[in-house]
Image (tube, rainbow, N blue to C red):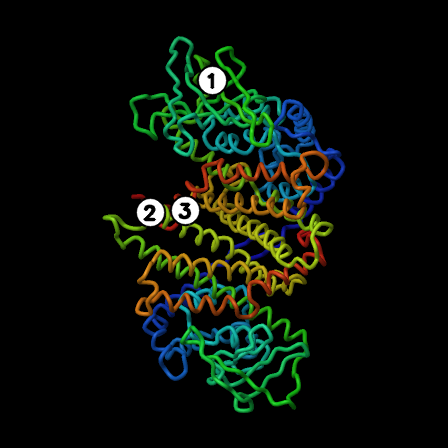
Amino acid sequence: MDLKFSAADEEFRAEVRGWLAANVPDPALPSGDTAEGFAAHLEWERRLFDARWAVVSWPAEFGGRDANLWQWLIFEEEYWLAGAPQRVTQNGIFLLAPSLFEFGTPDQQRRVLPKMASGEQTWCQGWSEPNAGSDLAAITSRATRDEPAGGWRLHGQKTWTTRGAFCSHLFGLFRTNPDAARHRGMSYLLVDLDQPEITVRPVERLDGDEGFAEVFFDGAFVPDDMVLGTVDEGWAVAMATTGSERGLTLRSPGRFLATAAKLVELARTRADVADTALHDRISQAWIDAEAYRWQTFATVTRMVEGGHNGADISSENPAGSSMVKLFWSELDVRMHELALDLLGPHAELVDGDLAQWMKGFEFSLAGPIYAGTNEIQRNVVAERVLGLPRR
Amino acid sequence: MRFAFSEEQLEFAQATRDLLAKECTPAHLRAAWSNATGRSEGAWSALVEMGVTGVLIPESSGGLGLTEVDLVLLLEETGRCALPEPIVDTALVAAPESWVRIDETAACVLPESPLAVWADTAAVIVVLAADGVRVIRREDVTLAQRRSVDGARRLFDVTVPDHVAPIAPVAAAARAFRRGALGTAAQLLGLADQMIEMTVGYAREREQFGVKIGTFQAVKHHLADARVKLEFARPLVYRAAWSLKQQDAAASTHVSMAKVQAGEAALLAARVALQCHGAIGYTTEYDLHLYMKRAWALEKAWGDTTWHRRAVGRALRAGGDQRKGS
């Protein structure tokens, strides 16, 4: 056991901190889940990319720095602590990219990754359908063979597609073999959304942003070389992606440590010093954020010693990532509820500086739902971690 | 950064687990509940034989010369079996400071834990107070026995003669407190794990409505919550052990975080275990209560959850973000 970062990692932290201090937008950008905010965020993503901070853990040839897993976690801690903008590229760089590194051909990696890192192409996730939410294997959207064109024609509908109204590309699951059993016969396809056979309808979210979209496919085309992994075996690729979504990549500890730090600051001016119950909740939020940090460090130690590099962060134990998702999603709700308690009658404000808390609260409420509801995650923990019988 | 134990540390813990699986079974615990001392017959001498009481003592003084990091997993094992022995008071607190010989035991008294456990069989009573540490031979204090909900824990009110002066400064008392709280946190992890494991075993076998009760989501979700709580308690306990070893300036806060998370994990595991067992768990014929009652006692010992959470809060308000720069 050695709980100190190496000198190289500390130097990396200092460099990240210095660059962010000089470059993080002030005032903060408008929400990236609106048309106006999305464009502003893409400019920020481009600045990150030009300074090679967009995807630190990726190989240099794709725009990264070959940073190790520790440095990636350090980057995340510093990024959120500096109050830097939400990543509108996140579903590409954190969800699709780990699967591309694991399952993609060298050609797919070359064509997709650099443009994803720079924000030139933006990716949304096409999984849920009107009748397939928690039960993802119930999807019915299909891809049929177009032999002369050398690819697949898509039919059906995806829904709850985050930033679908603004993104240029979609990765999703489609049935390529209608005769196969539930979890078989699906393929993982990489779709260019700029086609007349695709209709995207924005859907206003709980927080008022047009962050959701429904995506309708009416014969849109995907060439054979944009199938990720093997045809009919997309489920395995998708499961790798959900591991990233629940665990290390999408929601790393840095984000929650930053919220806890902001709560402590908010309490300095807003909390009655005599209100011990309130202070106890703040202390507990901090302890929980620390617990997530150190639990992650234990996970990363195992991954590093198992031979994982910085880019390959999707191979984490999927059942372990279910525990992680339960923990951070519920912590996030508790922290935002606490912030609203601190704000009292100002909690309902959605203008000015305090708006971030109501906005954050609304967003935190999505956490126990997306990436597999927490009820599903509890089943996974019970069955695959504890060994309780499925039925 | 490497947040994992070494092969040797894991082997040491496994050896302790194997030993205690033989020497501290539920039958041994039941015997301790009804015997004269509340203590195990063979487990303690076997642990002393292994050198456990001298783990933190330098090799030059007859100990193993190891650290809190080496000891923490082993303490978790003593929690898993609800070992009825003063291992925290002795091996973690008194022996490293030479307040007790390694073939004797100690019983600690402090404002946050005013009742001395297994004091009648201890060689010395260690009193941690605001003005320092007093160490008194047991025959020089007055003991009045009290009963614990955990029948193995023999509790005593201790009256120390007025003329006894501190033999070690406040800093030593603070160090002793940190170690005692860490050791108790580690035992709480083991207890939580034990209760979850027992309950999973039961839910895999017990049938109602024609199926194993472990197939019901209501049961699964209770147990998943307990498992998640434990998952996010362990790392803070191991990190606190490291901070103690390093004499980190924030070690005291790290220990408090550990005690909070471990105490909460053990209480939730106890609650879930009882609920999922149903009426059988509510009997003393079934073994669950042996572990549950120990968890209830230890969550309150060496500073309860609220005490430690407030200690973290004071540090937070005084120091802000202690993560910066590390």
Quadrant of residue A353 within the rendered picture: top right
Mark 3 lies on residue: A381
**Mark 1 on the same chain as mark 2:** no
| Residue A382 in sight | yes
Q: In the drawing, does residue B162 fall left or right of residue A313?
A: right
Image coordinates of residue A360 in percent, x first then y, are 61, 38
Mark 2 lies on residue: B216
> Gap in Å between the C-alphas at discs 1 and 2?
38 Å
Given contact means CB atoms under 8 Å apart, are the residues at marks 1 and 3 in contact? no
**Mark 1 on the same chain as mark 3:** yes
> Gap in Å between the C-alphas at discs 3 and 2?
14 Å
Given contact means CB atoms under 8 Å apart, are the residues at marks 1 and 2 in contact? no
Q: How crowded is mark 3: few (under 14 residues within 10 Å), some or many (20 or more)?
A: many
Given contact means CB atoms under 8 Å apart, are the residues at marks 3 and 2 in contact? no
Residue found farthest to the top? A148
Select label 1 or label 3 by which is in front: 1
Mark 1 lies on residue: A216
| Residue A61 in sight | no
Q: Which of A62 and B191 is in front in this view?
A: B191
Measuring 33% from the left and 28% from the top, which residue is drawn there? A184
Image coordinates of residue A118 in percent, x first then y, are 63, 26
**Mark 3 on the same chain as mark 2:** no
Q: Is residue B40 above or below residue A264?
A: below
Quadrant of residue A68 within the rendered picture: top right
Q: Which amino acid does label 3 sit on?
A: Val
